[in-house]
Image: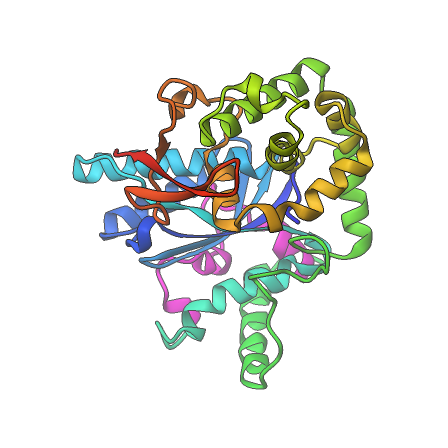
């Protein structure tokens, strides 16, 4: 389960449709500048290659908003470079909350060692598209926030770059000794997608609960309406048909997607029950059965399309039965219909 809210996050993103993210040195340079200047974030580390970006951000916003900004910025960059508009980054990637005290130093060292591990260079310091050089510099770039990691390594502000180099040398020896690396696919926590201890997760959830309590009823209703609109459009229904609880078969099949979307955005079940009109036990049952009723591919597509603040920009509601094509979705894709049959769903070309 993915966590939400302000915090430190690790991101791993590939190119859309298995295409390269970067096609020139200029794009690498632009990409680094994009990551270093995302609104209400601080860039802690990054490593880039032609097909993948890995980076760590401290964010005051939810990671979904951050990724929306990153997607738009990279699309704009490609258009400026090549005078052609296209989706650069895949809608699907890996996002993990990071417990800084326990995992940040090891995570950044592992990222900086990645080019060497992948045999791109003989030594990590030689790789140009990594924040490693910024950590070694006496004066790091102003947009690279090295303090959190270096403070974990050093008890003093003096000679921190030398201390970092020493740790990198030690980590190379540990790699050669086959020390187990961090799992950057699933994280370290058994329940949540995170590199974190149980106590850190509990504190994060408490902070999220307080933030949720401050969310107005109007905000929740707005999110609910947007989620219903998206799911209804996806299954060729209007919203009134979707939320009609008298049609129990259809209601029990499709409303769980709405509940799942709301929960992914940080809404709590006790608030969702008031919107949906079903008790919490039923919502939990819906969520448990969701993977059996709908393929993960379909759920990923719906989640990728959902942006409550800008549904109109995606054409939701303006062009019925049409969805934006992604790298995993060809011109005609299979989607589940409300009666369990397979229907062909067209998609718009960009």
Position of residue 46 measured from the top left corner of the image (x, y, whole percent): 46, 54
Position of residue 23 measured from the top left corner of the image (x, y, whole percent): 23, 52
Is residue 267 positioned above or below 218 on the image? Answer: below
Q: Is residue 27 left or right of residue 275?
A: left
Name the residue at 32% across, 35% down: 347
Name the residue at 56% across, 60% down: 108
Is residue 70 positioned above or below 90 on the image? Answer: above
Name the residue at 53% across, 24% down: 308
The residue closer to the viewer here, 266 or 290, is 290
Q: Is residue 169 left or right of residue 148?
A: left
Q: Is residue 170 left or right of residue 220?
A: left
View extreme (bottom): residue: 177
Q: Quadrant of residue 344?
A: top left
Q: In the rendered structure, does residue 252 fall within the stretch colored magenta?
A: no
Q: Total marks drawn? A: 0
Is residue 247 positioned above or below 125 on the image? Answer: above
Q: Residues in magenta?
A: 124-153
Position of residue 15 measured from the top left corner of the image (x, y, whole percent): 35, 51
Q: Quadrant of residue 348?
A: top left
Residue 61 visible, this orientation: no
Q: Quadrant of residue 59?
A: top right
View extreme (top): residue: 218
Q: Is residue 94 left or right of residue 7?
A: left
The residue closer to the viewer here, 232 or 318, is 232
Name the residue at 59% across, 42% down: 58
Question: What colouring method underlies this structural image?
Answer: rainbow
View extreme (left): residue: 83
Residue 40 visible, this orientation: yes
What is the quadrant of the C terminus in the image?
A: top left
The residue closer to the viewer here, 102 or 323, is 323
Q: In the rendered structure, does residue 146 fall within the stretch colored magenta?
A: yes
Position of residue 225 measured from the top left corner of the image (x, y, whole percent): 59, 19
């Amino acid at each position: 389960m993915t966590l939400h809210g302000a915090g430190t996050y690790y991101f791993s993103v590939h190119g859309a449709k298995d295409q390269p993210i970067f096609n020139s040195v200029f794009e690498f340079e632009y990409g680094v500048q994009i990551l270093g200047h995302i609104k209400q974030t601080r860039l802690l580390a990054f490593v880039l290659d032609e097909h993948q970006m890995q980076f760590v951000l401290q964010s005051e916003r939810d990671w979904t908003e951050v990724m929306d900004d990153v997607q738009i910025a990279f699309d704009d960059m490609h258009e400026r470079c090549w005078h052609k508009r296209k989706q650069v980054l895949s809608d699907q990637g890996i996002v993990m909350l990071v417990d800084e005290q326990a995992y940040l130093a090891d995570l950044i060292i592992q990222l900086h060692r990645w080019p060497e591990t992948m045999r791109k260079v003989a030594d990590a310091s030689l790789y140009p598209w990594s924040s490693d050089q910024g950590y070694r510099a006496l004066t790091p770039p102003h947009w690279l926030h090295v303090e959190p990691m270096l403070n974990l390594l050093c008890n003093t502000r003096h000679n921190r770059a030398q201390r970092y180099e020493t740790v990198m040398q030690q980590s190379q020896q540990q790699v050669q000794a086959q020390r187990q690396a961090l799992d950057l696919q699933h994280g370290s926590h058994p329940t949540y997608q995170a590199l974190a201890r149980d106590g850190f997760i509990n504190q994060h959830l408490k902070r999220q609960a307080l933030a949720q309590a401050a969310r107005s009823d109007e905000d929740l209703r707005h999110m609910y309406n947007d989620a219903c609109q998206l799911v209804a459009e996806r299954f060729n229904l209007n919203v009134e048909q979707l939320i009609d609880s008298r049609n129990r078969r259809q209601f029990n099949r499709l409303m769980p997607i709405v509940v799942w979307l709301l929960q992914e955005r940080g809404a709590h079940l006790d608030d969702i029950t008031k919107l949906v009109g079903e008790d919490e036990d039923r919502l939990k049952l819906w969520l448990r059965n969701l993977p059996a009723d709908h393929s993960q591919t379909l759920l990923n597509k719906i989640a990728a399309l959902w942006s409550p603040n800008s549904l109109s920009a995606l054409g939701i509601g303006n062009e019925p039965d049409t969805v934006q094509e992604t790298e995993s979705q060809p011109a005609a894709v299979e989607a589940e219909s409300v009666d369990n049959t397979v229907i062909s769903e067209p998609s718009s070309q960009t």
